[in-house]
Image: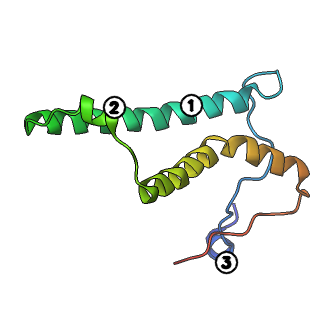
């Protein structure tokens, strides 16, 4: 068996995976829809957990939040920051569909560029 350790050191790691993607459902788009739903479920759980922690900490400190939350108006800066977070959220959720669309239009030998190092 040949020793590939020297070759492995000189070969850069791939940024993406080439080849056929695993499919679990026969109908077109179902795998992508499931991936989107799972991404949303992950995002929602993070929000629920943070909300629960916030409510527990507030209750421990004797702060009543429901009325304050219902009546809160975001400042322009807060709204801008939330809108940017919302766009990032949408980008993460629909990453699967965007990746699928890009793979359909990409040439077989095209490879996305690696992320830049800080």
Residue beneath label 1, please? Answer: 38
First in sequence, mark 3 or 1: give its number. 3
Q: Nearer the viewer, mark 2 or mark 1?
A: 2
Q: Nearer the viewer, mark 3 or mark 2?
A: 2
| Image quadrant in which you'd find residue 16 | bottom right
Helix, strand or loop for disc 3: helix
State how far apart marks 3 and 1 are (Cα).
37 Å
Query: Mark 3, residues whose alpha carbon is within 10 Å: few (<14), some, or many (≥20)?
Result: few
Query: Mark 1, residues whose alpha carbon is within 10 Å: few (<14), some, or many (≥20)?
Result: few
Residue beneath label 2, please? Answer: 70
Helix, strand or loop for disc 1: helix
| Image quadrant in which you'd find residue 108 | bottom right
Q: Is residue 105 left or right of residue 96?
A: right
Q: Is residue 118 left or right of residue 50?
A: right
Residue 37: percent from the left, percent from the top?
60, 29
| Image quadrant in which you'd find residue 93 | top right
Query: Mark 2, residues whose alpha carbon is within 10 Å: few (<14), some, or many (≥20)?
Result: few
Query: Vertical placement of 22 versus 13: above or below?
Result: above
Query: Residue, x 54% and y 33% (percent of image)?
Result: 40
Query: Residue, x 82% and y 21% (percent of image)?
Result: 27
- Front residue of this view, candidates 84 and 38: 84
Tags 3 and 2 touching, CB below 8 Å: no
Residue beneath label 3, please? Answer: 10
First in sequence, mark 3 or 2: give its number. 3
Q: Nearer the viewer, mark 3 or mark 1?
A: 1
Query: Vertical placement of 111 versus 18: above or below?
Result: below
Q: Is residue 39 left or right of residue 51?
A: right
């Amino acid at each position: 068996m040949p020793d590939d350790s020297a070759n492995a050191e000189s070969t850069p790691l791939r940024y993406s995976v080439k080849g056929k993607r695993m499919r679990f459902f026969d109908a077109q788009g179902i795998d992508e829809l499931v991936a989107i739903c799972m991404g949303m479920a992950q995002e929602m759980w993070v929000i629920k957990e943070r909300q629960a922690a916030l409510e527990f900490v507030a209750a421990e400190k004797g702060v009543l939040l429901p009325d304050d939350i219902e009546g809160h108006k975001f400042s322009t800066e807060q709204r801008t920051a939330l809108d940017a977070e919302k766009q990032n959220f949408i980008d993460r959720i629909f990453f699967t569909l965007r990746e699928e669309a890009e793979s359909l239009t990409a040439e077989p030998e095209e490879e996305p560029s690696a992320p830049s190092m800080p």
